[in-house]
Amino acid sequence: MKRFLMMMVVLGLALAGPGLAQGAAASGLPREGEMRKLTLSADRKPAATPEFRDEKDQPITLAAFRGRVVLLNLWATWCVPCREEMPALDRLQALRGGPDFQVVAVAQDRAGREKVARFLAETGATRIVPYLDASMKSGRAWGAIGLPTTILIDREGREVGRLVGIADWASADALRLIDAVIAEKP
């Protein structure tokens, strides 16, 4: 009986395997290199829309970016990997930022706006808007379990996928992935 059950499990995996592979391929999103670390959302649910603060300290939500693909990056001034990742996010904003795409880097930080501005200056991130959430409620709403956490969001405000940890967001692999999401029809 035990052997029979084991054979059924193996057979089930063999039959399901191609379907699972087709499901990943059906997404049509190129995930090469370190972009394989991006966990795709199974059903692209709407991303949470908690409030955070813009550069003028006014409340804002992701709804302000509807119609654009957003790379939402959650970071903090005390986060060493965030310091390493920020220049790539800045390069990405320089390469793709515009009416179709925006890097939205939200500092999850109680240190205040001045320290956030200093961090961005020290890392050479001149194209990143200094968004801030001193309450850190937005990170919890977005389900961040560590920093940095980066969430790719489509034009309709739905989560495409997320990556916990550092990545080179200006790499050719990241650009191909982002370009594919930009090219999707709403």
Image: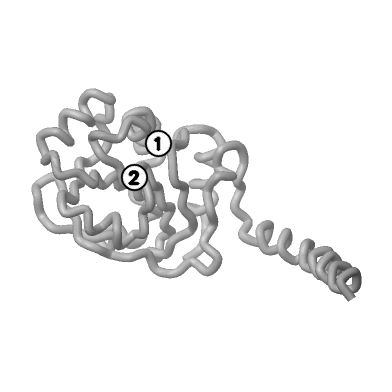
Q: Residue furthest front?
A: 2
| Relative to 170, residue 14 above or below | below
Q: Secondary structure at mark 2?
A: strand
State which quarter of the image contains the N terminus: bottom right
Q: Vertically, is 138 above or below 114?
A: below
Instruction: Name the residue located 41 percent from the left edge and 52 percent from the top edge.
Output: 151
Asked whether residue 70 appears in the rendered view, the answer is: yes
Q: CA distance from mark 2 to mark 1?
A: 8 Å
Q: Residues within 10 Å of mark 1 (few under 14, many from 20)?
A: many
Q: Which numbered disc covers residue 163? A: none
Q: Mark 2: which amino acid? A: Val
Circle 2: is it few (<14), some (14-19), or many (20+) Cα within 10 Å? Answer: many
Tag 1, which secondary structure? helix
Residue ID for mark 1 = 92
Find disc 2 in the rendering and name its residue.
103
Relative to 43, 73 lies left or right: left
- What percent of the width, then of the height, locates residue 138? 25, 57
What residue lies at 36% left-to-right and 61% top-to-bottom? 67
| Residue at image coords 54%, 34% | 172
Q: Report the side of 121 relative to 57 (left or right).
A: right
Badge 2 or badge 1: first in the primary sequence: 1
Residue 16, by quadrant, is bottom right
Q: Is the C-beta separation of discs 2 and 1 under 8 Å? A: yes
Q: Which amino acid, mark 1?
A: Leu
Tally of numbered discs? 2
Q: How is the image coloured?
A: one colour
Q: Position of residue 181 (x, y in %)?
A: 50, 53
| Res 90 → quadrant | top left
Residue 90 appears in the picture as rendered: no
Residue found at x 39% / y 68%: 46
